[in-house]
Image (cartoon, rainbow, N blue to C red):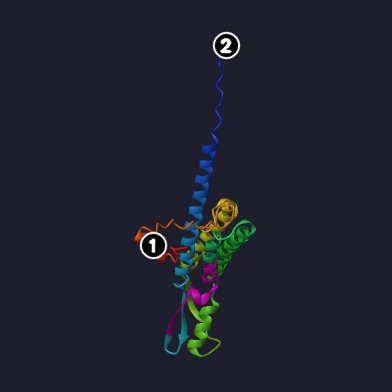
Amino acid sequence: MGRVSAVPVPQPRAAAASAAANGDRRSLAAALLLGAVGATVVLLASGQIWAEGRAAVAGGALPLDASGSEVTGVPTALAIVGLAALVAVFAVRGRSRLLVSALLALSGAGAAAAAYAGAFDRETLELEAAKTVGHSSATVEALTHTAWPYATAVGAVLILLAGLLALRYGARWPAMSGRYERDGSPRAAAAPAAVDPDRPEDLWKALDRGEDPTG
């Protein structure tokens, strides 16, 4: 007898479509999680102390510190922009979605760059020292930076990743549109229920709906 070779069975279209839908849902969930967590981290970390030091005053040294929002307001502003862009991704389609996804990614990149630069900032504490001492030549001693600028940068990178996911897979994500059918046309209004004039409860229901039961 001749040897019968096995013929591979092609994957059914339904299974392929289901796998694609699952992949879209995973990328959508990942983008939402990354964007929301990243923006939250940026907003929280920007309010923490980023830099500490001392200003020399008569009789000793005065401790100084500066929060992230005092060093730079860019990460906070861009995190808010990123959150708005993350929501807007699901409200638009086509080229508009591509542009909003790019804005989301750029918000994360800009916030990360600003946070990283803030990790080496000295000017903010020097200005605070000048105000405290009352002399523009006041200097800051023992300047140190905390880990919060880097935490802010990590949160911003999460926003960037959400934007990259939206750029890559966003074209296949659904849009928020419960008032319209898939073809974009408005849903047809439901026909009013028939009113039986011999049933008082039907007459009352028609009146409650603003209909004329005698018409």
Q: Residue at x 44, y 56 (%)?
A: 194
Q: In the displayed structure, does residue 60 sit left or right of residue 134? A: left
Element type where label 1 sits in the image: helix
Give coordinates of residue 39: x percent, y percent.
49, 64
Furthest residue in direction right, as rendered: 95
Q: Residue at x 54, y 65 (%)?
A: 82
Asked if marks 2 and 1 touch (Cβ < 8 Å), the reply is no
Magenta highlight on residue 171: no
Magenta highlight on residue 77: yes
| Residue 2 marker | 2
Q: Identify the amino acid type marked 1.
A: Leu
Give coordinates of residue 66: x percent, y percent.
47, 77
Q: Identify the amino acid type marked 2.
A: Gly
Along the viewing direction, whichever of 153 and 180 lies nearer the viewer: 180
Of badges 2 and 1, nearer the viewer stands 1
Element type where label 2 sits in the image: loop
Q: Which residue is mark 1?
A: 203
Q: Residue at x 52, y 86 (%)?
A: 130
Q: Residue at x 57, y 55 (%)?
A: 166
Q: In the displayed structure, does residue 38 sit left or right of residue 205? A: right
Q: In the displayed structure, does residue 197 sit left or right of residue 138? A: left
C-alpha span from label 2 to label 1? 81 Å
Q: Mark 1 Cα within 10 Å, few/some/many (few <14, many 20+)?
A: some
Q: In the displayed structure, does residue 69 sit left or right of residue 203? A: right
**Residues shaded magenta:** 61-81
Q: Mark 2 Cα within 10 Å, few/some/many (few <14, many 20+)?
A: few
Quarter of the figure that contains the N terminus: top right
Along the viewing direction, whichever of 1 and 88 lies nearer the viewer: 88
Circle nearer the N terminus (2, 1) = 2
